[in-house]
Image (cartoon, rainbow, N blue to C red):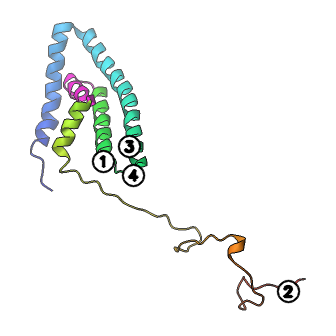
Amino acid sequence: MRPIPFLPVVLFGLPILEIAVFILVGREIGVLPTLALVILSGFVGLSLLRSQGLDILRQIQAELDAGRMPGEAVFHGALVVAAGLLLILPGFVSDIVGIALFLPPVRAAIWRMLRRRVEVVVMETRAPRQDGYDRPVVDLDAEDYGRRDGGAPGTPWRRLPPN
């Protein structure tokens, strides 16, 4: 896997940018309104994450019920979670990016750009049976089988003599 060249720039540059924007906004509107905006954006992020997240979960369920893979819906869900986290984090730059990610046209544009790189993989898992057998179970009704007297000795299916 190739290293991402812009990752160090983002990791070090974003906090510096956020601090600079805090200072600029604080200078323009004051400290208390700036802090109020940061707190308000956190609450907005929580409420949008809750409402949009539930909508995305309904879309994923509808896709699964229709027998389709919910790749796009899962991608939109991941972007909604990222948007909510960006709004919850303090900072105006992250808030702008978070608000943009909550907008469905922005998410759709990102999906169109990345869908060729996204691969949805279906994995099937099966839990081991409790009785130790890993074979299919045949469930029969009483009329589907019959008994014979004198089954093989030592088997639990032979009929025991009455007491």
Q: Amino acid at mark 3?
A: Ile
Tell me the residue at 12%/54% (across/down): 2
Q: Which residue is mark 1?
A: 71
Within 10 Å of disc 1 (Cα), the crowding (few <14, some 14-19, many 20+) is: some
Residues 158 and 64: in front is 64
Q: Give the overall secondary structure of the magenta segment.
A: helix
**Rendered position, 70 above or below 16:** below
Tell me the residue at 27%/10% (across/down): 33
Q: Position of residue 155 (x, y in %)?
A: 70, 86
Within 10 Å of disc 3 (Cα), the crowding (few <14, some 14-19, many 20+) is: many
**Rendered position, 16 above or below 7:** above
Q: Which residue is mark 4?
A: 67
Q: Residue 161 got which mark?
A: 2
Q: Amino acid at mark 1?
A: Gly
Residues 140 and 161: in front is 140
Tell me where the magenta segment starts and ends, as one range. 90-103
Residues 80 and 29: in front is 80
Q: Residue 119 got which mark?
A: none
The answer to which of marks 4 and 2 sits earlier in the sequence is 4
